[in-house]
């Protein structure tokens, strides 16, 4: 198997996966912060 086909078959899906995981991590962090803020405001 030549290297170009390996890069195109494996590299592109890996790039997309890392991009999506990074975006999800950011959204989860924002959601977690919002939940913490809501918890604090409900305690008052």
Image: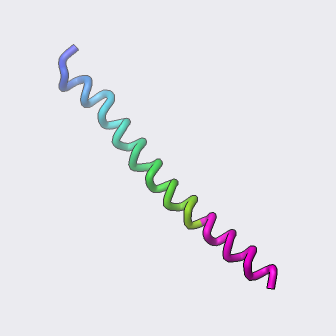
x and y percentages locating residue 40 in the rendered image: 73, 78
When the figure is inspected, residue 42 is found, relative to residue 34, above or below; the finding is below
When the figure is inspected, residue 22 is found, relative to residue 4, above or below; the finding is below
Query: Which stretch appears magenta?
Result: 31-44
Front residue of 27 and 8: 27
Q: Is residue 37 left or right of residue 1?
A: right
Q: Which residue sits at x=67%, y=76%?
A: 37
Total marks placed: 0
Q: Is residue 38 left or right of residue 31?
A: right
Q: Quadrant of the N terminus?
A: top left
When the figure is inspected, residue 8 is found, relative to residue 21, above or below; the finding is above
Q: Which colouring convention does the figure follow?
A: rainbow
x and y percentages locating residue 7 in the rendered image: 25, 29
Front residue of 36 and 26: 36
Q: Which residue sits at x=81%, y=80%?
A: 43
Locate residue 33: give its quadrant.
bottom right
Prevailing secondary structure of the magenta residues: helix
x and y percentages locating residue 34 in the rendered image: 64, 72
x and y percentages locating residue 24 in the rendered image: 51, 54
Q: Which residue sits at x=68%, y=69%?
A: 35
When the figure is inspected, residue 16 is found, relative to residue 37, above or below; the finding is above
Front residue of 26 and 13: 26
Q: Is residue 21 magenta?
A: no
Q: Is residue 33 magenta?
A: yes
Q: Quadrant of the C terminus?
A: bottom right
């Amino acid at each position: 198997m030549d290297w170009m086909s390996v890069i195109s078959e494996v590299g592109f899906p890996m790039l997309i996966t890392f991009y999506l995981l990074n975006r999800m991590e950011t959204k989860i962090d924002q959601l977690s912060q919002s939940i913490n803020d809501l918890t604090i405001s409900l305690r008052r």
